[in-house]
Image (spheres, rainbow, N blue to C red):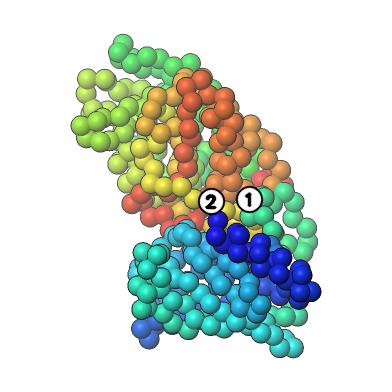
Amino acid sequence: MRLTLYSFLFSLSILLSGQELIDVSGEWNGNSNFLKIDYQITTTIIQKGSQLEGFTINKSMNGKDSSKVVFTGVIDGTTVKLYPQKFEYKTGTACMSNSILEFSETDNQYSLIGKWKGDIRLKTCPPAVGGNLKLYKTRDKEIVTRIENDLSEPVRTLDESDDIGNALINELGNRTYYALIIGINNYPDDQIQELDNPIKDAQGLADVLITNYSFEKENVTLLKNPSREEIINSLDELSIKVTDKDNLLVFYAGHGIWNEQLNQGYWLPSNASINSKSNWLSNSTIRDYVGGIKSKHTLLISDACFSGGILKERAVFENSRAILELYKLPSRKAMTSGTLKTVPDKSVFIEYLLKNLKSNSAPLLSADQLFRNFKIAVINNSPNGQVPQYGPISQAGDEGGDFIFLKRQ
């Protein structure tokens, strides 16, 4: 709130004084240093008057540290002040710090040069820690495509000038999309209630992926009422043929159960018995497969009771540049119909998931954007107030990227 008020007051003083506000929007590239280690820095700034927001990607030249930090900031004359808010991802010893930079310009280049320094309020970098920071942007020609003012808006169309978006479409067109889709209605164990809709929901998702997105029919496996062995065999097959350039979507609709004693969630295959865990499929086993299959991006969608137990935390972003950054980094994400509670057989979650996949007109759509498009509709229309979840699967190799759906042309 203090930052917003400061920005407003400063903008008012600029207006009254007639001073022209500098423009620092766009992508800046440069370097920093700490303890004789050099860092490559890419900072994307979205400017709204004197108020700033965006994100910074830091990578150490020795390959040990990397992070993506979301920030807010303000412009004070020619001084740019950036204040970190949260990590989108972090590996190694990266920490959040404030940056105070001075803006200057030459015939061919804009510069932001200054220092970064720790702040005890951030609870990451100690106050005594700091270093130099130099960022540059070409004046005559932008290095990247235009950055939209609102990060929450998806890319609806791409024109010829959107080089990043079009390049990414071409790149994804050369990658293979695999899907394992599981629907279970029937349970021979009399103590497990049979369901009416999972197979229909699974078939509906398979049809949408094949018809609307870049999933070829031969790469989509649809399992109806499978046993635990059949699910494991299908996962084993994927672990052999999926490469680190491919993308994988796994969907499960059926019964789920939570074991309080073991603090563990389970899927119940068709041959599961309520009195024995031998044919249950645990979250930890699913996590091991998700982490072990060498895909570039894996998205797990689970429409089952207690499915939220596999999640770690949430994440956000969108536009051509943001989608590119999300695609660059490996991801292991899960989208679930609820948290640690029961969900109904007639799934509002799958209804709005399919509705949004069908109505989407964006050539590139991240799983996070898809989720944000229908989350509120699920909450508002579910009979028991279920709250769907989205985020990285813990300890499965997620590095902050995201699954990108590629629309058929």
Image spot of residue 82 (x, y percent): 54, 70
Q: Is residue 350 above or below residue 393?
A: above
Q: Position of residue 50 (x, y in %)?
A: 67, 67
The amino acid beneath tag 2 is Val
Residue name at image x 44 percent, y 82 percent: 131
Instruction: Please give the name of the residue rendered at 63% of the width and 72% of the height, measured from the top-left corner.
Output: 75
Say above or below: 405 vs 377.
below
Whether residue 231 can be seen here? yes
Residue at 51% from the left image edge and 20% from the top image edge = 383
Q: Neighbour class for label 1 at 10 Å: few (<14), some, many (≥20)? A: few
**Quadrant containing the N terminus in the rendered view:** bottom right
Residue 66 image-quadrant placement: bottom left
Count the marks: 2
User: Pointers 1 and 2 in contact (CB under 8 A)?
Assistant: yes
In the displayed structure image, the side of residue 122 where residue 70 appears, left or right: right
Disc 2 secondary structure class: loop
Single out the residue that lies furthest toward the top: 190
Residue 9 is labelled as none
Horizontal placement of 69 versus 407: left or right?
left
In the image, which disc is placed on residue 152? 1
Q: Position of residue 226 (x, y in %)?
A: 39, 26
Q: Mark 1 is on which residue type?
A: Ser
Nearer the observer, 59 or 228: 59
Q: Residues within 10 Å of mark 2 (few under 14, many from 20)?
A: some
Q: Secondary structure at mark 1?
A: loop
Q: Which residue is mark 2?
A: 316
x, y (%) of residue 331? 46, 53
- Which of the two residues, 311 or 133, is positioned nearer the viewer here? 133
Of the two numbered discs 1 and 2 on the same chain, state the one appearing first in sequence. 1
Q: Residue at x 43, y 67 (%)?
A: 96
- Above or below: residue 215 compared with residue 6: above
Asked where in the image residue 204 lies, by quadrant, the reply is top right
